[in-house]
Image: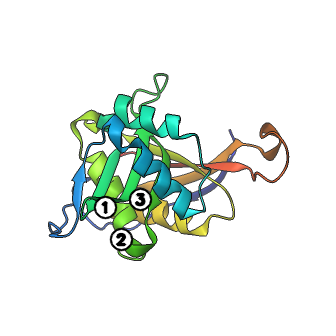
Amino acid sequence: MQVLEKTDTSRVSDDRKVSHKPSEELLFRKPSGEDGAQVWELIKRAGTLDLNSSYSYIMLCEFFPETCVIAEQDNQIVGFVSAFRPPIKEDVIFVWQIAVDSSQRGKGLGKRLLHELLNRQACQDVRYLEATISPSNSPSQSLFRSLANSLDTECEVSECFPEEYFPGSGHEEELLFRIGPF
């Protein structure tokens, strides 16, 4: 894999687990299968993510609750991160999708969801966070670079899935963002 970019970040905190003031409005929790439909609706409303089947979100919520995080406000899901531990990369957590409701954008919820994920017991021995991001998705690129900065670690960007891997036309290549070690 060719490294396209390597970014050193400045020190923000001595601890990889960044604490946040508790929010009276937001509840962070593990999902369950019954959340899948609401998560699907959130992803659909976001309009910027690949919308997978409702069944896939039900399965994620049911079978990966330790590595998925829901942000809830007034019994409505306003944020979601789906992630998993790749069996061939024992020290990695791979973030598949992160969605924030339009009512919560610009408030740092995406980064809070990622910190919540990294603070989970399931991520105790994780040293790297990985995600794929298309070249035109500047907000996600900024989010993951900001996360690396807050964790006082590096963010390496490399080729991952070229455009020709995707059927049909219209899907950009996906770049791998690798944050760590922490």
Which numbered marker is on residue 108? Answer: 2
Three-letter amino acid code at the position of disc 3: Ala
Q: CA distance from mark 3 to mark 2?
A: 14 Å
Q: Which residue is mark 3?
A: 148
Find residue 143 and report its horizontal and vertical position in percent: 47, 64
Find residue 137 and report its horizontal and vertical position in percent: 62, 64
Left/right placement of residue 123 relative to residue 25 reads right
Q: Viewer-proximal residue, 118 or 10?
A: 118
Badge 3 or badge 1: first in the primary sequence: 1
Number of the front mark, 3 or 2: 2
Q: Under tag 2, what secondary structure?
A: loop
Badge 3 or badge 2: first in the primary sequence: 2
Tag 2 near tag 1, CB within 8 Å: yes
Q: CA distance from mark 3 to mark 1?
A: 13 Å
What residue is at 35 percent from the left and 66 percent from the top? 109
Q: Viewer-proximal residue, 62 or 94?
A: 62
Label 1: few (<14), some (14–19) or many (≥20) C-alpha neighbours in 10 Å: some
Which numbered marker is on residue 125? Answer: none
Label 3: few (<14), some (14–19) or many (≥20) C-alpha neighbours in 10 Å: many
Dividing the picture into quadrants, the one containing residue 72 is bottom left
Q: Under tag 1, what secondary structure?
A: helix
Three-letter amino acid code at the position of disc 1: Arg
In the depicted structure, whether residue 93 falls above or below residue 26: above
Find residue 38 and report its horizontal and vertical position in percent: 41, 51
Answer whether residue 2 is visible to the viewer in this image.
yes
Q: Under tag 3, what secondary structure?
A: helix
